[in-house]
Image (cartoon, helix red, strand yellow):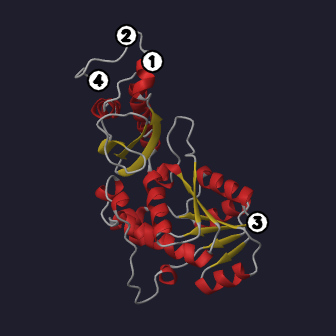
Amino acid sequence: MQVVRTRAQLRAVLASAPRPIGLVPTMGWLHEGHVSLVERARADSATVVMSIFVNPRQFGEASDFAQYPRNEARDLERARAAGVDVVFAPPVDEVYPPGFDTAVAVGAIARPLEGAARPGHFDGVATVVAILFALVGAERAYFGLKDYQQIAVIRRMALDLALPTEVVACPTVREADGLAMSSRNARLSPDGRRRAAVLHRALEAGIACVRADRCGGDAVRAAVRAALASEPDAVVEYVSVADPDTLAELARIEGRALLSLAVRIEGVRLIDNELVVAALPREREAASPSGPRPEGRSN
């Protein structure tokens, strides 16, 4: 495995690298979720490139950036064991050279949810990913679905800017209790880590609500919030039931919906999501012994 620090070194190494190339962008503190991305990239690619860069431009809070977990030696060992060929681990001024004065701003898909909660966040994400796509020139790049909106933003950016790298979405990897694997989990105390499992329980409560044919958006949001309320120390930033394509909030689920949330545990901001599919109206009518529901009936 080669470790490179500069744009020039990266380009030189990749000039003769076997293709196709798979890119796994990360901010380090690697866990099994990252390893699963590498495994997918390894299966698809002749060369696997991983970036390790804690991107300051996507952090709204200076304290959040300062506290983000870092351990390069640990990360490099894990990357090597996972089968990465090239690690790009640059200093900040190599990604953003002196005088850097460009930002990539994606439109509507970046505005709700994380975009509303963290102004400027997706500008930072889109800018750094555009730089990585340009530098690596990979055929494919791999991202985890825990960051569902991030994938949607990056896909929109790549399409609009005619970037040839395909954005591949990979399943969320979870702990035994359902908590989505995240580098931020390392900041939780053992007790906080135990309490953080409420995020997945809340999403499961929302899914159960849909499967019980209570498909009103407000009913599903209320079910998720009620489950979160079982953990008094959970500070809820948002609960969303949205169209998976547009991220517009849904009044009623008829087909696919994205259930997502952002919650702070011990001050650590955690996000998660699940896709759910409700029976379409005709399917519900066919399955119901009493036929269509009366107009105006509550959820």
Most distant residue in the left direction: 296
Q: Which numbered tag is attached to residue 290?
A: 2
Q: Does 28 sit above or below residue 243?
A: below
Q: Residue at x 39, y 27 (%)?
A: 281
| Residue of label 4 | 299
Q: Residue at x 42, y 46 (%)?
A: 244
Q: Residues within 10 Å of mark 2 (few under 14, many from 20)?
A: few
Residue type beneath disc 1: Ala
Q: Residues within 10 Å of mark 1 (few under 14, many from 20)?
A: few
| Residue of label 3 | 46
Q: Earlier in the sequence, mark 4 or mark 3?
A: 3
The CA distance from mark 4 to mark 3 is 52 Å
Residue type beneath disc 2: Ser
- The image shows residue 96 at horizontal and vertical percentages of 46, 82
Q: Which numbered tag is attached to residue 286?
A: 1
The CA distance from mark 1 to mark 3 is 50 Å
